[in-house]
Amino acid sequence: MARGRCAIPAPGRLRESKQIDVAARAVSGETMRIHNQKDFWSGVLFVAAGVAFAVFAQEYQMGNAQRMGPAFFPTVLGGLLAILGVIVGVKGLAGITAEGRVEKFHFDALGWVLGGVVLFGLLLRPAGLIGALVVLIVVSALGSHEFRWKETAILAAGLMLLVLAVFIRGLKLTIPILPALMQH
Amino acid sequence: MELLSNLALGFATALSLANLSYAFLGALIGTLVGVLPGIGPVATLAMLLPTTYALEPTSALIMLAGIYYGAQYGGSTTAILVNLPGESSSVVTCLDGYQMARRGHAGAALGIAAIGSFLAGCFSTVLVAGFAPPLVELAFKFGPAEYFSLMVLGLIGAVVLASASLLKAIAMIILGLLLGLVGTDVNSGVARFSFDVPELSDGIGFVAVAMGVFGFAEIIANLEKREQREVFTDKVHGLLPNPQQLREAAPAVARGTLLGSILGILPGGGALLASFASYTLEKKITRNPRPPFGQGNIRGIAGPESANNAGAQTSFIPMLTLGIPPNAVMALMIGAMTIHNIQPGPQVMTSNPALFWGLIASMWVGNLMLVVLNLPLTGLSIQLLRVPYRLLYPAILVFCCIGVFSLNNTSFDVFATAAFGVVGYLFYKLKCEPAPLLLGFILAPMMEEHLRRAMLLSRGDPTTFFTRPLSLGLLLGALALVVMVTLPAIKSKRAEAFEEAD
């Protein structure tokens, strides 16, 4: 797959496949003239981040060029990032680059995997390592389209033994193993 | 012979029983994790970084270096046996390696990858040892203005050579710089962008960024690809290439080593560029290749794999001498050094000679171990490749989560890593490469500090960067790189190269 940077200096030098691709899109008009959605949204992201950093930086002292305050460098960088974001975004919009619809987001996989991680963080203190690990393993495993209960239970048991051996016995980490209620 | 006495010190450090076993452990774990499809060296290193906290700095760095080589070698194994590149630099290995495996030469392909890597490693270790001291000398002459310009050159160079979209990559650097500024400003004591969250006043955890963006995001991305894997597990027997194959491979190894060593020193060089350049060279130089390249020619593995390893190793030179990471892996190494309270930069060689030379010597030791481990590990790797992904990733997550938690014994870091997992997934969808972000993130505090000092010394006159000859030279270098890639002729060549990389 070609990356966005394969710009079009002269149409004649384009590879055939790309020409067809561009033509097909022009005919269907499906992309609403945003020829490179990836670049367009990247640009939006950069502008938003740049502006946010520059604006929040204003809470701090700017100082001057000789004695730069804490706001100086972030303001300059935020401005630069916003400008670059505009260029990237406009290029994506104007179709100077000719590739790249943003593919579908798989929020289920994202949700299961990171949900398991967040739950692990939340449960570690109150439920102890054992409880938190079981939740992490089961929840994150649900993110796969091939999830099986039995298999996951065996996996959880095996991993538990490994973790207790490696991290608690071996590396001697001080992590609460049992739920808070069961400790004194 | 100062070099010899330095190397002797290095080998004395690296060959101590403790360090030898850490190098071994690193290479072993690195190989096994690197074998997992879709997990490249950067993700492997980020994931395993917490396991080295408890160690002494020297042992920790030696183990990390071992993990790195192991991960790279493990990545080649996956590329050859499953045709899945763990990272971009093993894309090239897939081309001929997988074809060799299909023809029943999987063992020879794996063997030549290990042997080539080892020979390249021997050469480039000597190169690192020889090159580092004079560069350190030079680095001591640098003032803040030169350092700032050097970082500009380093960052620009890293993306010019290694990124598909220059503008986006530069934007990612700046975003990384901004993220790196979060936390207490050393000059004024103000906690910047911390929004009264006490954990943020120490800055965003470097492990959280690396593990979230490289580790978690990759897992999520892997979960949505439902691809069929065809693993050549039964056909691996005899890891030694036959004499005919060795004869063909030897010159390719030599060329790859030289090319890789040179490219590795350049900012942004490292493994990726080296392996691509070597493959192109082999293709150009070989007349009437039989079998043709892309259909299982052993030169197509021997050259790039050697170049890859040589480049990976010489890219330690800018990291060790200047404290400037030429690629994401070296950014992680610098992060690891700071976790162990070692300020990266030219002073490391004088203040921590045992660490400096021990690390260099351990590169060679690590490479040797990989060749020795090669045979038994390949069997183990094949077993690992048979484990379905649905069982692997929860296990990976478990180790990540415990590692991140143990960083400061707080759940905050776990949440931060999850947040960066979301960010990383977004980057993946928008095709924003995360490596430049990590480089910027690591360099941000140093860059601001040098900028401030330079401006203070020049009394607020920004022309200081252009009037000091060394600084001017470095900035002109950065400019030249940018101009070079925007020239139409090179632009289309680059576009082609990255198209192949995809």
Image: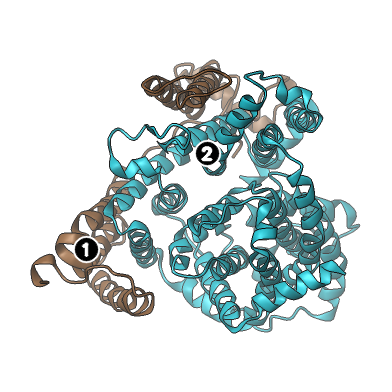
Chain colours: A brown, B cyan
Q: Is residue A93 above or below residue B426?
A: above
Foreground pick, B497 / B365: B365
Secondary structure under the numbered disc 2 in the rendered image:
helix
Question: Could you tell me how far apart the alpha carbons at marks 1 and 2 are, in whole angstroms?
Answer: 35 Å
Query: Which chain letter goes with mark 2?
Result: B
Q: Position of residue B460 (x, y in %)?
A: 62, 19
Q: For the residue marked with disc 1, what is the amino acid?
A: Ala
Which quadrant does the N terminus of chain B fall into? Answer: bottom right
**Residue named by callout 2:** B445
Residue A164 placement, left or right of B48: left
Secondary structure under the numbered disc 1 in the rendered image:
helix
Q: Position of residue B208 (x, y in %)?
A: 40, 50
Residue in the picture at 32% in, 57% down: A144
Q: Position of residue B132 (x, y in %)?
A: 77, 56
Foreground pick, A103 / B219: B219
Is disc 1 surrounded by few (<14), some (14 to 19) or many (20+) residues within 10 Å?
many
Dividing the picture into quadrants, the one containing residue B144 is top right
Q: Which numbered marker is on residue A132?
A: 1
Residue in the picture at 89% in, 54% down: B285
Foreground pick, B303 / A16: B303
Q: Marks 1 and 2: which is nearer the front?
A: 2
Dividing the picture into quadrants, the one containing residue B292 is bottom right
Q: For the residue marked with disc 2, what is the amino acid?
A: Pro
Q: Is residue B283 above or below residue B177?
A: below
